[in-house]
Image: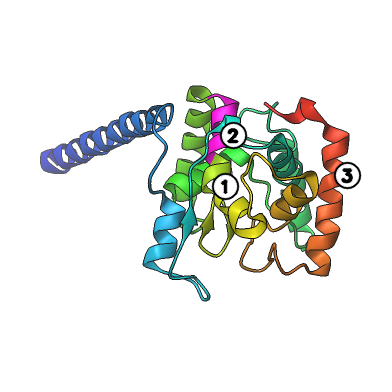
Amino acid sequence: MKYPKLIILYLLKKFLWVLLSFFIISILFVSSLHFINPPIWAWKLQRQLLPPENYPAQIHHQWVDESHISKNIKLAVIAAEDQLFAQHYGFDFDSIMSALTTNAQGKQIRGASTITQQSVKNLFLWPGKSYLRKGIEAWLTILMELILEKQRILELYLNLVEFGPGIYGVEAASQFYYNKSARDISVQESARLASVLPNPYRFHVNQASGYTIQRSRWIKKQMRQLGQAALP
């Protein structure tokens, strides 16, 4: 009976060591985002290794500092994706409960992920819905909210999110669709960009459907109601 106990203790120590290493490495990675603009991230890497249909040979991405991004697009993505972004600590529990309730009724809904959670997914995670992935997502979301300022989280999100096949970040999207810088895009243009999130392969900025037109109008209305107070 002695040897099984020793094996269990050995495995437990190994597990705790791996867990501690993960915590330390994840803290270092998130802390580095204070001053490093990531040159590669998980979502982009997945697209390049396993490209979906219609993925272009040439991708577009250009990092732009938060100060060079129009308040219009900042407010548009907050209105579209996470209206309590400036107030919550990474999780919108009211939206989560609403999503669970609606799911239980068998209705189709949009996800309840916050901008912080989406930033974590874009930066670090792989596709899937396992409990392990959800646990890692929750931990990294908490870390990001504790370590980074809201303005930096929003800057990361706007520079990494995909607005169309192979079009990463708001600067690349502004240049590609409107031939102008992200600092100059209008309310209408910002609402149209935000309207394709989070599925820019199904919905298209430059091919307006009934859905994107309707959603753009809704986003503009939400922008007016939220106002500048919604910005971090």
Label disc, if present, on residue 171 of the rendered structure: 1
How far is disc 2 from disc 3 in space, using C-alphas? 24 Å
Mark 2 or mark 3: whose residue is earlier in sequence? 2
Q: In which quarter of the image is the N terminus?
A: top left
Q: State the residue in front, 230 or 193.
A: 193
Who's the residue at 21% across and 41% down the image? 11
| Name of the residue lying farthest toward the left | 3
How far is disc 1 from disc 3 in space, using C-alphas? 24 Å
Q: Give the range drawn in magenta.
A: 149-156
Label disc, if present, on residue 221 of the rendered structure: 3
Q: Are marks 2 and 1 in contact (CB under 8 Å)?
A: yes
Task: Name the kind of residue labelled 3 in the image.
Answer: Lys
Mark 1 or mark 3: whose residue is earlier in sequence? 1
Task: Name the kind of residue labelled 1 in the image.
Answer: Glu
The kind of secondary structure the magenta stretch mainly shows is helix
**Residue 192 placed where, x, y %?**
75, 55
